[in-house]
Image (spheres, rainbow, N blue to C red):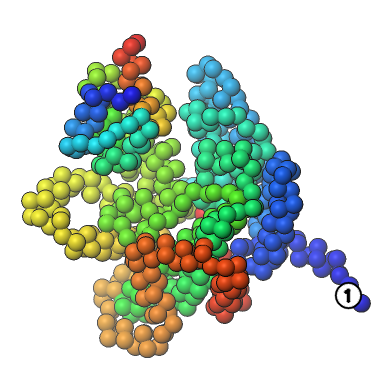
Amino acid sequence: MISEKFKAAILKELKLSDFEIQDSTLASQVPGWDSLNHINVIVAIEKEFGVRFKSIEVLKCKNIGDLQKLVNTKLNQ
Amino acid sequence: MFQIDFSKVLQLLQFDKRDPLLFGSSLFLALFIGVLLVLFILDKYPKAKFLFLTLFSFYFYYKASNQMIWLLLTMAVVNYGLGVYIRKNSIQWIKRLLMLTGVLANLGALVYFKYTNFILSSISQFNNQPFEALPIIVPLGISFYVFKSISYVMDSYWEFFEEEHSFLDFVLYLSFFPSILAGPIDRATAFIPQLKNNPSTLLTKEDIGKALFLIVMGLMKKYVVADYIGLNLVDRVFDSPLRFTGVENLIALYGYALQIYCDFSGYTDMAIGIALLMGFRLMENFNYPYKAKSIAEFWRRWHISLSSWLQDYLFKPIQMSARSLKIFGNILAVAITFLLCGLWHGASWNFLIWGGLHAFFMIVSLLLKTPRKYLLEKSGLGKLKITGFVQTVIAFHLIMFAWLFFRLPDLNAVKEVLTQMITFFRPAVAPQFVEAYPVITVLIIAGYLLHFLPQKFYGACEGVVIKAPVIVKALIVTLAILIVTQFRFADMVPFIYFQF
């Protein structure tokens, strides 16, 4: 389940006023989330939640839901 | 009495250097009808069907290239073995070690076959020593099946497979004949799950229509547009640029941009259509690339299976590892990805420069992104349709400039073409060219017009083929074959992307 804080961090980085994000949403479906901007979104999420991802952890994410789960796991550690 | 000379049949089925098995050949058509028939008979026995398709794929590879069946088989065994061990192992460092072994082994094979002579000749050149090339034959399609193998090992490491699969499933994925020689570089995670549902030759009317539409389009693009323009214009001009005016060199360059698109996307259309007739879905590879408004968009539309491969297995890992460098991390990832993308196409400085040019365009665009966005918003130009048109024209001409390095054999030839364009342009020759070569002119103009038509047009054409009765479908295919025969040359022109 996508949290409000998580969604807000993404929208802020991509300068979007609103966009519906679900677990199954792919990064490429979000306006502005292209391959070059991808890293900025990842860094923004890391900063927002005070976590640090390993490369493989992010590369394994198939959709935004997986990224949210990764944040949750990091926060519970 | 009717007698069959079996020795001749056997001869026909053996590899013949002058007549390799290609999609457009009559032998392929005959064999493919036979394949469809066998698949139809074996429809309820998936294992037997997959075994038959794998054996036919190996035969196709032999008949098309006469090379390295053993290499393909060895790669299948090694990669499947590594994949299984990576997926079953729970110790992270062992998984990582196996993954690295797999990637290095695959790259090692690619480097050995494709780049040994290039590396040795560069070293000799550097040391001012004579160089004698080693007798290494580059196996046809190696760049494509090595990349398929690497993605398989990486996807195993990243745990992208939801279900386990058999060795036969993997060999069929690696050797699948429609895509073995020039892609699309399909992903095992998309191909293998299809096998669980037993892809069938008993297709819906829609799929038959789609497949036939793709095959007809592919035949037209390759044999009518690409080969005709290639042989009658591009080759003639670029074989000796100094004998032609600048304007003719420029027309040849426009011709080449169309030729390479029609050649490669025509092949892909046929590959996807042929696979679909057997019930398999391959990934999309082209999406009207010259409609792109930027170089980045071009790479989302051109050779999609390669660009998405590079993005997933090279660009993103570099980008992630270098994220502390901020924008320079992105620049580094773009530069490495495009230089290697250039080298993937061939062992030469020209390909490296071609990749370097695309990297340069992307980096400049990345650095100017914020001021460009600001300017377009403030001036209101961003909302105008003409802005999009201008962006497309600029992007297309940058791409076309880079194609010069891709097409010409060396830097000296590039220099000759550019010299003619700058110092000996002679625009008055253009009308004479149009008058002297009406077929080429019509093909180039029609080719570009068709490319830039709205996508709806193709959807409508596809819809007509889908809805058409069987007899009309047969007529369309026959008509296409007739047109192709009219345009085809005595010698088969190999697909450009076979050399990669």
The answer to whether any part of residue B438 appears in the image is: yes
Q: Secondary structure at mark 1?
A: loop
The outermost residue toward the top is A77
Chain identity of mark 1: B
Q: Is residue B440 left or right of residue B17?
A: left
Residue A31 place in picture, x, y as percent = 26, 42
Residue at left offset 50%, top offset 74%: B224
Between B191 and B399, the one nearer to me in the picture: B191
Residue B244 place in picture, x, y as percent = 37, 80
Q: Which residue is mark 1?
A: B2
Position of residue B129 relative to residue B266, above or below, is above
Residue at left offset 36%, top offset 37%: A26
> Looking at the picture, which amino acid does disc 1 mark?
Phe
Between B63 and B211, the one nearer to me in the picture: B211
The answer to whether any part of residue B115 appears in the image is: no
Dividing the picture into quarters, in which one does residue B197 lie?
A: top right
Residue at left offset 41%, top offset 85%: B438
Q: Is residue B441 left or right of residue B135?
A: left
The outermost residue toward the left is B378
Residue B320 place in picture, x, y as percent = 33, 31
